C-alpha cells in the first residue's frame, strides 16, 4: 500500500484523497495535504448541498488532527467558497471536519470523550489545547448527537430540579427520566419560562403521556407543571423535603449560637473573628456537622457532640429530633409514612420552635405532593445523584464560555448517548437501564 493510502486510512480521511505529506519544522508538525473526492467537493459548509463555486476563499487551510506518535498532525487543504442557494457565500464543507472549525472530527471526538472520562488537566496536557477550546468542542459534539437522537421520546415519569453554578450566581434547570435514569434536558435559568422551553420541546402530545413528575415543589415548577401537564401526579422529592428540615434546624442552630456564651461580639461578618469564638458558642458551631448528618453516619466524636447538645440546649436538641422525625417519616413511604407524617405535623405544630412551626405549615401546603411521593415510590436516589454529578461537572466546566458547553458536557456524561472514541462508530447508545455512564473521573 502506498504511504499516502496508509495516512488516509490512519487518519480516517474518508471521502478524501491524500495528495502529499511533509514535516513543517516551524510548526513541529506533520502536514498531510488532502482534497475531498470529486463527489464531496463544492458543497455548502452548512447544509452540504452541492453549489456553484464562488471564489478561492482565504487559500489553504489547516485542521488539527490526531497526533502521530509524539508529533502534532495538521491536515491541509484548499478552502474555496461556494454560493449556496439557502446560505449565500459559504466556505465549502470538508469531509474530515465540522463546518468552520480548526480541528478534525476525530480530534473533536477524542477531546469530547476525554472531557467526560478524565480530569481537566489531563485533557489539556494530552491534547495540548486550552480548556476553553475543549468547551467549544464539547458543545459541537453534543450538538451533533442532539441532532441524531430524540431524548424526549417515551417519557412517562420525570424529575425536575435546579442546579447552581458559577459560584451560585447562575442556575440550570434539569429534567431526568425516572425510568431510564437518563438526563434528558437541561436549560439555562430557573424559572417558569425556562421550564416552558422544555414543554415546548416536548410538545403537547408527548406531554399528555407523562404520568408522574417529581420536584422540590418550588412555586415556579408547580406553576409550569400545572399549566403543561395538569393530569400528571406531582410528587415532592424526598431529599428536598429533608433539606427543608435541615434549613429549619439551621435557624435554630444560629439562635443557639447567638445565645451561647463565648460568642465573639465584634465584627461577626469577618470570618477570622468568627473562628475566634470560644466556650459554648464554639461548641455549638463545631456541632453543626453532627446536626446535619444522618445518625447512622455519625462518628463517635460527633455522637458526643450531640449528647452535649442534648444536655446543654434542650431546645436545639428538640429541633434536631424534629429534623430526624421528618426524615424518618419520608423514608418510611406508603401508609406507614403518612401516619408518621401526621404524627410529625402534630409534634412540629406544638413544638413552639418558630422555624419548625413554619415548616409544618409548608409541609401541610405540600402534603398532597409528599403523600404522592410516598405512594409512587419514585426513586429519590436518581434525582439526587444526577444533581450531585452535575454539581461536580459545574466545577469541571469552570472556565468554559457560557452555559452551553456545561450543558453539553452534562448531556454527554449523563444523557445515555456518550461520546464515542474516533474510529469506533458513532452514536452507539449506552445500554438502557439505570446505569448512567460510569467513570466520571473528575479532578
Ligand atoms: Zn447551504
Image: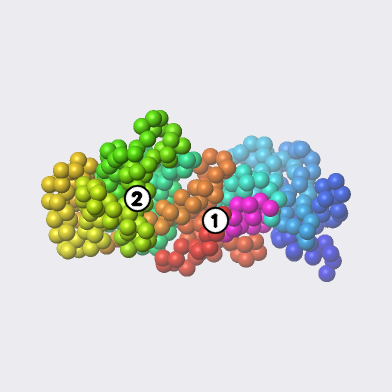
- Per the image, the residue denoted by label 2 is 287
Residue at 46%, 50% in the rendered image: 391
Q: Does the magenta stretch include residue 45?
A: no
Q: Is residue 376 visible?
A: no
Mark 2 crowdedness (10 Å alpha carbons): few <14, some 14-19, many ≥20: many
In the rendered view, tell whether residue 228 sits above or below residue 180. Answer: above
Mark 1 crowdedness (10 Å alpha carbons): few <14, some 14-19, many ≥20: some
Query: In which quadrant will I find the N terminus?
Result: bottom right
Secondary structure at badge 2 equals loop
In the rendered view, tell whether residue 273 sits above or below residue 143. Answer: above
Q: Is residue 270 visible?
A: yes
Q: Which colour scheme is used?
A: rainbow
Residue at 21%, 47% in the rendered image: 315
* Nearer to us in this view, 336 or 76: 336
Numbered range of the magenta stretch: 104-125
Residue, far top: 267
**Left or right: 7 in relation to 115:** right
Residue at 32%, 44% in the rendered image: 280
- Per the image, the residue denoted by label 1 is 442
Query: In which quadrant will I find the C terminus?
Result: bottom right
Q: Does the magenta stretch include residue 110?
A: yes
**Left or right: 225 in relation to 144:** left
Residue 357 image-quadrant placement: top left
| N-term-proximal mark, 1 vs 2 | 2
Image coordinates of residue 200 in percent, x first then y, are 38, 44
Q: Distance between the residues labelled 1 and 2?
A: 30 Å
Image coordinates of residue 134 in percent, x first then y, are 62, 48
Amino acid at each position: 500500500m502506498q504511504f499516502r493510502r496508509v495516512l488516509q486510512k490512519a487518519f480516517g480521511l474518508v471521502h478524501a484523497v491524500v495528495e502529499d505529506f511533509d514535516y513543517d519544522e516551524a510548526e513541529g508538525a506533520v502536514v498531510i495535504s488532502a482534497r475531498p473526492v470529486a463527489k464531496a467537493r463544492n458543497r455548502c459548509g452548512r447544509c452540504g448541498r452541492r453549489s456553484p463555486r464562488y471564489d478561492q476563499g482565504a487559500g489553504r487551510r489547516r485542521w488539527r488532527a490526531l497526533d502521530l506518535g509524539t508529533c502534532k498532525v495538521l491536515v491541509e487543504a484548499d478552502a474555496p467558497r461556494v454560493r449556496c442557494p439557502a446560505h449565500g457565500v459559504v466556505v465549502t464543507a470538508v469531509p474530515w471536519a465540522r463546518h468552520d472549525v480548526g480541528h478534525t472530527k476525530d480530534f473533536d471526538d477524542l477531546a469530547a470523550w476525554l472531557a467526560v472520562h478524565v480530569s481537566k488537566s489531563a485533557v489539556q496536557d494530552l491534547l495540548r489545547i486550552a480548556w476553553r477550546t475543549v468547551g467549544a468542542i464539547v458543545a459541537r459534539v453534543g450538538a451533533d448527537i442532539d441532532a441524531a437522537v430524540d431524548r424526549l421520546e417515551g417519557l412517562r415519569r420525570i424529575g425536575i430540579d435546579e442546579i447552581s453554578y458559577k459560584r451560585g450566581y447562575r442556575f440550570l434547570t434539569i429534567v431526568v427520566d425516572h425510568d431510564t435514569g437518563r438526563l434528558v434536558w437541561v436549560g439555562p435559568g430557573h424559572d417558569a419560562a425556562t421550564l416552558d422551553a422544555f414543554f415546548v420541546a416536548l410538545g403537547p402530545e408527548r406531554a399528555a403521556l407523562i404520568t408522574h413528575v417529581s420536584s422540590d415543589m418550588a412555586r415556579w415548577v408547580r406553576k409550569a407543571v400545572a399549566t403543561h401537564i395538569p393530569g400528571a401526579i406531582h410528587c415532592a422529592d424526598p431529599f428536598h423535603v429533608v433539606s427543608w428540615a435541615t434549613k429549619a434546624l439551621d435557624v435554630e442552630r444560629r439562635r443557639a449560637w447567638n445565645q451561647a456564651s463565648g460568642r465573639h461580639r465584634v465584627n461577626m461578618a469577618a470570618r477570622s473573628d468568627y473562628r475566634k469564638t470560644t466556650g459554648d458558642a464554639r461548641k455549638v458551631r463545631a456541632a453543626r456537622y453532627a446536626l446535619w448528618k444522618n445518625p447512622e453516619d455519625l462518628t463517635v466524636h460527633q455522637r458526643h457532640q450531640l449528647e452535649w447538645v442534648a444536655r446543654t440546649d434542650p431546645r436545639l436538641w428538640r429541633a434536631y429530633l424534629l429534623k430526624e422525625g421528618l426524615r424518618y417519616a419520608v423514608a418510611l413511604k406508603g401508609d406507614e409514612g403518612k401516619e408518621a407524617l401526621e404524627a410529625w405535623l402534630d409534634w412540629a405544630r406544638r413544638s413552639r420552635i418558630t422555624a419548625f412551626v413554619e415548616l409544618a405549615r409548608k409541609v401541610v401546603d405540600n402534603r398532597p405532593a409528599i403523600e404522592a411521593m410516598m405512594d409512587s415510590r419514585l426513586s429519590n436516589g436518581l434525582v439526587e445523584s444526577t444533581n450531585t454529578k452535575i454539581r461536580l461537572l459545574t466545577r469541571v466546566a469552570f472556565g468554559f464560555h457560557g452555559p452551553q458547553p456545561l450543558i453539553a458536557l452534562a448531556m454527554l456524561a449523563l444523557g445515555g448517548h456518550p461520546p464515542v472514541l474516533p474510529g469506533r462508530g458513532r452514536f452507539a447508545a449506552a445500554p438502557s437501564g439505570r446505569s448512567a455512564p460510569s467513570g466520571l473521573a473528575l479532578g
